[in-house]
Amino acid sequence: MTRDPEDPGGSDAPSSFLTHPEHLFPRLTAHEISRLRCFGILRHWAAGEMMIKAGRSDVNMFVIVSGAVSMMSGDRLRGSHPVAELHAGNFTGEIGQLSGRHLALVDAVAIEPVDAIEMRPEQVRTLINAVPELGERILHALILRRIRAMEIGMGPVLIGHSQNQRLRELRGFLTRNAHPYSVLEMDTDREAQVIVDQFGMTTDELPVAICPNGTILRAPTDAQLAAALGFLSDLDTSCVYDVAIVGAGPAGLAAAVYAASEGLSVLVLECSAPGGQAGASAKIENYLGFPTGVTGQALAGRAYTQAIKFGAHIAIPVQATALHCAERPYSLETRGGTAVRARTIVIASGAIYRRPAIAGLDEFEGRGVYYWASPIEARMCVGADVAVVGGGNSAGQAIVYLASHAARVHVLIRKDNFETTMSRYLIDRIAGLANVVTHPRTEIECLEGDDGGLTSAVLTTPLDNGSARLDVRYVFLFTGAEPNTEWLRTCRVELNAQRFVLTGAAVPGSQPAAADATAVNLMTSVEGVFAIGDVRAGSTKRVAAAVGEGAAVVAQIHQLLASAGIDSSVIGLRA
Ligand SMILES: Cc1cc2nc3c(=O)[nH]c(=O)nc-3n(C[C@H](O)[C@H](O)[C@H](O)COP(=O)(O)OP(=O)(O)OC[C@H]3O[C@@H](n4cnc5c(N)ncnc54)[C@H](O)[C@@H]3O)c2cc1C
């Protein structure tokens, strides 16, 4: 059994802390229970009654007032086992509880007559925000339980061959979305073959996902898996949101946190997973407040939870395919055909890796060629020689990270050195790594391989040993990024020649910024449509800059809504 214990809430806490019953299952005092009575309703269960069934989506949180509840893993495939016993003052739930868009991971059965306060997800959010000292303890426990669920591999079971690209993509999708799961690999787990035979699955149907509610998905897409796990909910087409944000990278998540915390109704559409490019970063060391660095995923996990806590609706995986701004409220079309409406739009769709002109690239993407280096890729490279292409900061981070897994890291750069392209701290770090070899003025011309995937890269210039062939099974490309603006072709939002979005004084025909202007104007050529982060022409391509623009744009949205006479107190009303 292989597990991927990633960190959804961004906790750096050691495992013993995570598993400590006091933190995982805190007990509220009688006084605290009485304070939260008004946030839910008191209900009674007889001994033996099921309170929560694993795999159900309509799950509320229960604060136990009296009696005892047994929590079981709810694993229909390999047999259920006890997880915990809860008594007066304990409460059920995990972090998915906050959004209400998840399937229960456990069964809960009353083992004595039980009285408990039942709270719907929006009531839990209200409680967390209204009674912060109590809310903090509850939120902390919910995050730790998600981490624990990931550690022990609750949730869906993926079955497939370890080298299968779709299996790797599904693992990546669940990991980046901090959803617990476990994997049975056909190559090494005997149990995998037994299950495949038992359900009469054929090799073409692999990988399969067996969901907690018993649903079996054969070679599913990310969206099919998300829908079966309950975290892809239906979009509310009757609601006119104050703000619709496209993209849940650092910029979009920051805008969601600030907008939702200031009372605006917020919808975020994200086509992949929270965190964007930053989510792919093995370690961000220059973001304020994290002296020992933070993984992009941990940062994204925290920001996602924060946005949900304040009531933002984050739809994943949902891709915006077109923006229509001929009429107000504006309308966003999504893949699948649903359209959502909003008074203002924030373009936070960032950028995506550039695909250099290398012969054979298409053939080996996902079979030896990768555009990021997450723990999943790092595990494959243990003891192998790998190549990293690129001399920027993202390449630098990948070099440092991969060097601790691979036998040797070959770095291919066009320039003579990293001096003008990489931060000093990364240059110094790389200089201290004995297994990193840098090849200046070297590019890949074509890739070669066999049935198993990539075997070598043919270079434009021979290496010091005279060979123009690098025998590597793994090549990581960090060759810059292009803006995700394809979906803006249906509206009048002006782009520059490189297709980044123009804002403020950069928009043709706009007034130059006033001398006393205190903030960058983030409005595009269309009133009420804003752009922030990497997608914006002229922005600083850094996490902190994207987060800063996410905060700044909310002030500009408030100003616009106020000048249009829209009262923030009537926000989120249905049309
Ligand atoms: C490997 C790597 C390491 C990095 N390390 C650092 C670092 O250490 N420090 C630092 O300051 N910066 C770092 N950066 C840069 C930093 O990550 C970016 O500047 C930052 O992520 C930009 O944030 P953003 O929200 O503007 O865009 P992005 O992070 O690009 O996020 C955009 C989001 O929009 C989504 N999206 C795109 N199109 C659509 C659509 N049509 N519909 C729905 N969703 C859509 C994408 O899936 C993505 O999640 C790194 C970048 C990379 C690639």
Image: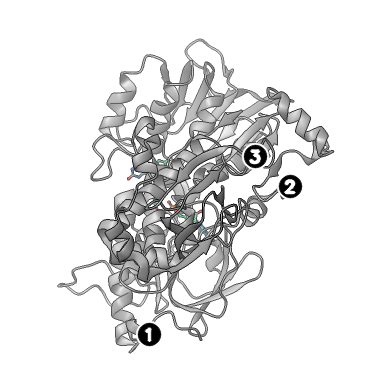
Residue 182 lies, with reference to residue 463, above or below; the image says below
First-in-chain label (1 vs 2): 2
Q: Seen in the image, is 533 located left or right of residue 170?
A: left
First-in-chain label (1 vs 3): 3
Residue 424, percent from left and from top: 26, 32
Q: Quadrant of residue 122?
A: bottom left
Residue 266, percent from left and from top: 42, 70
Between 316 and 246, the one nearer to me in the picture: 316
Residue plotted at (48% across, 19% down): 406
What number is the disc on residue 570?
Answer: 1
Residue 272, percent from left and from top: 54, 52
Q: Residue flagged by tag 3: what amino acid is it? A: Val
For numbered disc 2, what is the local secondary structure? strand
First-in-chain label (3 vs 2): 3
Between 525 and 14, the one nearer to me in the picture: 14
Q: Quadrant of residue 126?
A: bottom left
Q: Quadrant of the N terminus?
A: top right
Q: Seen in the image, is 17 located left or right of residue 337?
A: left
> Label 3 to label 2, Cα distance in Å?
10 Å
